[in-house]
């Protein structure tokens, strides 16, 4: 080894020892006859002193160094004078008196500072990702991610799970997002697909009798990017045989509690995790992935305002749609310009507008609102009482289809949580969302579609509605949510061929198409398939939340940008004509891709 100790290892117990360190120059301070070098490696920083009078050769070498030079330094550990102790680093009580310095490699001036977490344009960070990853924040994030995976493996292995790899090259069987296709040279005109998830394969492993499977699985989806998505991502994929919903939830909840306590310093808001039905979550929070670190619960006031004099509310109520309200404490004195911005935000979320009662504190709670003239004082008092509002509060109201109102209320809830700093970054609030709808109706194509995926077992008590009222059928589905993000989704699966074929038929797959895409599964179900279920927590999102980040690119070593590009390597790139000929592929671009 080129080092005897790491840069973050030295303590008072090492004083007097001869050590050899190797790492990067974090900072170099030249005070004439005395040079200080902060040497950095993955484990920390060690201060090195080089005295020209005592070690002229080492001082000469130190003179030639710059930030990010790679050095090997040999010397003796000594205690720092008390007035020179650096309490900001763990090695701050000692320093290394250098006797020998060897420059292992020189370095160009980096395009941004490595020694500190200064703000750098993300495109530059991604182009020079290997330098970005040297920075303390990124090293901390990637190490934490590794600890997450290590804990998961240990947790599941000790509970009799078997880690099994499934293929990356598989059959294209669209499951919601677009597949990434891989052409076959051996079979011209045919394609593999990169898996969106190992869903079918893990179910087949249950048919195979392994009973408890897991995998840290790489998955691929060709979909539009956002802060918590990547074209390639990592999930913990697990499946269990002979289980019911509670078995899966209890296993994963125990794992998450242990994981947070083991690898992070976050505080858990709830133990055990709350369980909300999908209907309850949508009603209270406007979302099936609510952030429970704060309240701001939505109230349904349809029945209250439907008979009042405001025609917009009355018409919405008469049509069977929804009027819902959200109280924002202490925001009743927002200026009109700010209120107009909220109205525009509601319109961007799909609503026709947004109503409000601004209860001005200076006027002892007198209501300011463009719609107040449509209500008498008693009616306004009723709404205020229902919302338990006080002088200085703001009441926001949206009226439309329930789906639109939910989106508006969720937008407002998140907006004011950010403005009022209600979401404590040091807390994690997990909850389970259960009893999801099994199907959703596609108005354009006039057919039912699976709300999650087509392999989900319906709730036993809702089987009776499959033929008569699919919209009433709930699936044995469950999502794990944390801090406003969906961490994982899972379900108890269909394990009977007849029921699986029926679900395929209900969502518009002909028998021929179903057998072409999923015949391997349907045939397998004829050979004694056990009841089974599973879940797939996202490793990237989980690491993101535990690291206190808001973008999963910050916890992925080499991510793609918002346009699914690798700026460092220049991918995607054009293929050589010879490669295309071998694959039997010709390229025609009809219009530029946006």
Image (cartoon, rainbow, N blue to C red):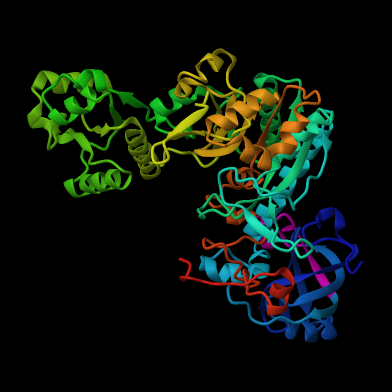
Q: At which x and y percent is residue 545?
A: 58, 44
**Is 82 within the magenta?**
yes
Residue at 67%, 42% (x, y): give it: 516
Residue 34 in view, yes or no? yes
Instruction: Classify 132 as above or below 280.
Output: below
Q: Nearer the viewer, residue 191 or 102?
A: 191
Q: Nearer the viewer, residue 496 or 168?
A: 496
Q: At which x and y percent is residue 90?
A: 72, 54
Seen in the image, is 25 located left or right of residue 421?
right
Seen in the image, is 392 located left or right of residue 250?
left
Residue at 62%, 60% (x, y): give it: 559
Figure disc tally: 0
Residue at 36%, 34% (x, y): give it: 403
Q: Nearer the viewer, residue 576 or 160?
A: 576
Residue 17 found in image quarter: bottom right
Q: Dividing the image into 4 quarters, which one contains the N terminus?
A: bottom right
Instruction: Classify 80 as above or below 574.
Output: above
Q: At which x and y percent is residue 181?
A: 65, 57
Q: Nearer the viewer, residue 486 or 20?
A: 486
Residue 447 found in image quarter: top left
**Is 455 within the magenta?**
no
Q: Dividing the image into 4 quarters, which one contains the C terminus?
A: bottom left
Instruction: Classify 407 as above or below 556.
Output: above
Seen in the image, is 368 located left or right of residue 275?
left
Q: Which residues are magenta?
A: 80-98
Instruction: Classify 225 as above or below 329.
Output: below
Residue 265 in view, yes or no? no
Q: At which x and y percent is residue 575?
A: 67, 74
Residue at 72%, 58% (x, y): give it: 92
């Amino acid at each position: 080894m080129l080092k005897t100790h790491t840069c973050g290892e030295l303590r008072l117990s090492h004083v007097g020892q001869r050590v050899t360190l190797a790492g990067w120059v974090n900072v170099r301070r030249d005070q004439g006859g005395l040079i200080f070098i902060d040497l950095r490696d993955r484990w920390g920083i060690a201060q090195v002193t080089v005295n020209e009078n005592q070690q002229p050769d080492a001082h000469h070498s130190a003179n030639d160094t710059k930030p990010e030079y790679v050095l090997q330094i040999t010397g003796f550990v000594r205690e720092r004078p008390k007035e020179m102790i650096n309490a900001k680093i763990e090695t701050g009580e000692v320093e290394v008196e250098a006797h020998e310095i060897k420059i292992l490699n020189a370095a160009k001036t980096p395009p941004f500072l490595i020694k500190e977490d200064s703000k750098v344009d993300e495109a530059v960070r991604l182009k020079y990702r290997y330098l970005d990853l040297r920075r303390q924040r990124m090293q901390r994030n990637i190490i934490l991610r590794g600890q997450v995976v290590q804990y998961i493996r240990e947790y599941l292995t000790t509970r009799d799970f078997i880690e099994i790899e499934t293929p990356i090259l598989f059959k294209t069987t669209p499951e919601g997002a677009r597949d990434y296709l891989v052409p076959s040279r051996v079979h011209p005109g045919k394609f593999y697909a990169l898996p969106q998830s190992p869903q079918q394969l893990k179910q087949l492993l249950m048919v195979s009798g392994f009973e408890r499977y897991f995998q840290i699985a790489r998955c691929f989806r060709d979909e539009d990017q956002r802060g918590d998505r990547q074209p390639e991502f990592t999930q913990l994929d697990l499946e269990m045989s002979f289980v019911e919903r509670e078995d899966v939830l209890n296993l994963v909840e125990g794992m998450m509690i242990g994981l947070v306590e083991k690898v992070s310093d976050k505080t858990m808001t709830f133990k055990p995790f709350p369980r909300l039905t999908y209907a309850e979550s949508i009603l209270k929070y406007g979302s099936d992935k609510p952030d429970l670190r704060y309240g701001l619960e939505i109230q349904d006031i349809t029945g209250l305002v439907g008979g009042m004099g405001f025609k917009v509310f009355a018409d919405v109520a008469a049509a069977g749609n929804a009027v819902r309200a959200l109280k924002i404490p202490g925001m009743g004195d927002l200026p009109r310009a700010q209120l107009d911005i909220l109205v525009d935000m509601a319109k961007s979320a799909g609503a026709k507008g947004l109503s409000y009662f601004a209860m001005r504190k200076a006027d002892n709670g007198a209501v300011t609102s463009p719609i107040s003239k449509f209500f008498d004082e008693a009616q306004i008092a009723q709404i205020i009482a229902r919302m338990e509002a006080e002088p200085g509060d703001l009441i926001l109201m949206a009226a439309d289809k329930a789906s639109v109102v939910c989106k508006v209320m969720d937008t407002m809830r998140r907006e004011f949580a950010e403005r009022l700093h209600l979401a404590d970054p040091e807390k994690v609030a997990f909850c389970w969302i259960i009893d999801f709808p099994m199907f959703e109706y596609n108005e354009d194509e006039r057919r039912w579609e699976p709300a999650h995926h087509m392999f989900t077992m319906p709730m036993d008590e809702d089987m009776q509605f499959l033929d008569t009222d699919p919209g009433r059928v709930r699936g044995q589905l469950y999502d794990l949510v944390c801090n406003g993000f969906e961490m994982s989704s899972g379900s108890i699966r269909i394990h009977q061929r007849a029921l699986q074929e029926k679900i395929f038929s209900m969502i518009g797959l002909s028998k021929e198409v179903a057998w072409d895409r999923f015949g391997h599964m349907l045939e397998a179900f004829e050979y004694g398939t056990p009841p089974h279920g599973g879940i797939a927590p996202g490793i990237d999102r989980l690491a993101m939340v535990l690291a206190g980040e808001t973008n999963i690119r910050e916890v992925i070593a080499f991510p793609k940008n918002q346009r699914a590009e690798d700026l460092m390597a220049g991918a995607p790139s054009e293929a050589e004509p010879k490669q295309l000929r071998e694959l039997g592929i010709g390229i025609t671009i009809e219009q530029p891709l946006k």
